[in-house]
């Protein structure tokens, strides 16, 4: 039990070395008995929430289904708070946008002539100074 308490404090039980907060959290989950409830507080800034959490777990293929389900519920909660903001976020970062990004990179690599032709025809924004 003493070794477990040291791990929870972020201290290696045999060397008394500080393990740091990331290792501490990993140890908590790994060594804790199944009956122990561990509480974590997650804090994200707006950009990280969109670009890392929602994008990687909802709009890019490959997220584990349980993780995806939890993040979807989080997204639904924030969506209810500000429909206009989160609709805009979803439009700019959803699966279709991720597909366009992937398509752009593949097209640029595989067919650069077509890529630059399309970019010149459809992608150039006019400046009020031009």
Image (spheres, grey):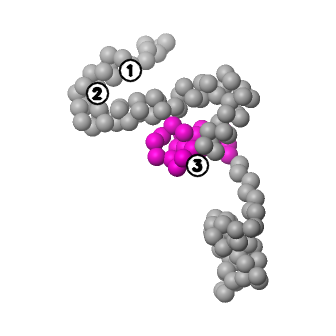
Residue occupying image coordinates x 67% and y 80%:
12
Residue 3 is situated, as x and y percent measured from the top left of the image, at 72, 82
- In the depicted structure, whether residue 66 falls above or below residue 7: above
Q: CA distance from mark 2 to mark 3?
A: 38 Å
Q: Residues within 10 Å of mark 3 (few under 14, many from 20)?
A: few
Residue 25 is situated, as x and y percent measured from the top left of the image, at 67, 65
Disc 1 marks which residue?
123
Left or right of 130? Residue 31 is right
Of discs 1 and 3, which sits in the foreground? 3
Disc 2 marks which residue?
115
Which one is nearer the viewer's eye here, 72 or 83? 72
Number of marks present in the image shown: 3
Residue 96 is situated, as x and y percent measured from the top left of the image, at 45, 29
Q: Which mark is residue 66?
A: 3
Tell me the element at label 2.
helix
Residue range of the region highlighted in magenta in the rendering: 44-68
Residue 1 is situated, as x and y percent measured from the top left of the image, at 76, 82
């Amino acid at each position: 039990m003493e070794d477990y308490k040291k791990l929870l404090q972020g201290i290696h039980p045999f060397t008394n070395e500080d393990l740091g907060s990331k290792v501490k959290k990993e140890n908590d989950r790994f060594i804790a008995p199944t009956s122990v409830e561990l509480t974590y507080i997650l804090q994200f800034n707006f950009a990280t929430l969109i670009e890392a959490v929602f994008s990687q777990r909802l709009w890019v293929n490959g997220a584990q289904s349980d993780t995806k389900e939890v993040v979807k519920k989080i997204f639904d909660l924030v969506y209810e708070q500000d429909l206009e903001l989160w609709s805009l976020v979803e439009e700019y970062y959803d699966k279709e946008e991720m597909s366009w990004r992937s398509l752009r990179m593949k097209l640029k690599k595989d067919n650069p002539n077509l890529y630059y032709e399309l970019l010149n025809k459809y992608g150039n924004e006019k400046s009020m100074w031009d």
